[in-house]
Image (cartoon, helix red, strand yellow):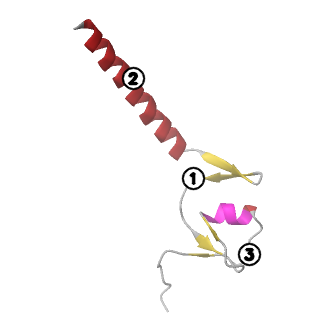
Amino acid sequence: MKNRIVKKLVFAGAMVFVAALSVSTLMSSVDFCGCRCPLIYAPVICDHGRTYPNPCVAECHNAKNCVPTGGLVAAK
């Protein structure tokens, strides 16, 4: 009985750790080529045909004339 309770407490503690790690990862940023860019997926395609996960990463790679992708069309 005591062994089961300890296992449940360890499992609960592990789940809290994983949840906290997930939230901190989503709220953080990543170092791309010396730039700190947010972990936000807002893809852009640039004039040389490469797609980047967001404008910050594209800028860090010195990409030019980038536009958002994802099916959004500007109204005419």
Q: Residue furthest top?
A: 2
Q: Which residue is mark 2?
A: 13
How far apart marks 2 and 3 lie (CA) works out to 47 Å
The three-letter code of the residue at mark 3 reads Lys
Residues at marks 3 and 1 touching, judged by CB atoms closer than 8 Å: no
12 and 55: which is toward the camera: 12
Question: Badge 2, how many Cα within 10 Å: few under 14, some, many 20+?
Answer: few
**SS label for mark 2:** helix
Q: Is residue 69 magenta?
A: no
Q: Main secondary structure of the magenta part?
A: helix
Residue at point 32% right, 12% down?
A: 6
Location of residue 12 with respect to 27 vertically, above or below: above
The three-letter code of the residue at mark 1 reads Leu
* Magenta extent: 54-59
How far apart marks 1 and 2 lie (CA) works out to 26 Å
Percent position of residue 21, x then y: 49, 35
Observer-side mark, 1 or 2, equals: 2
The three-letter code of the residue at mark 2 reads Gly
Q: Which residue is mark 3?
A: 64
How far apart marks 3 and 1 lie (CA) works out to 21 Å
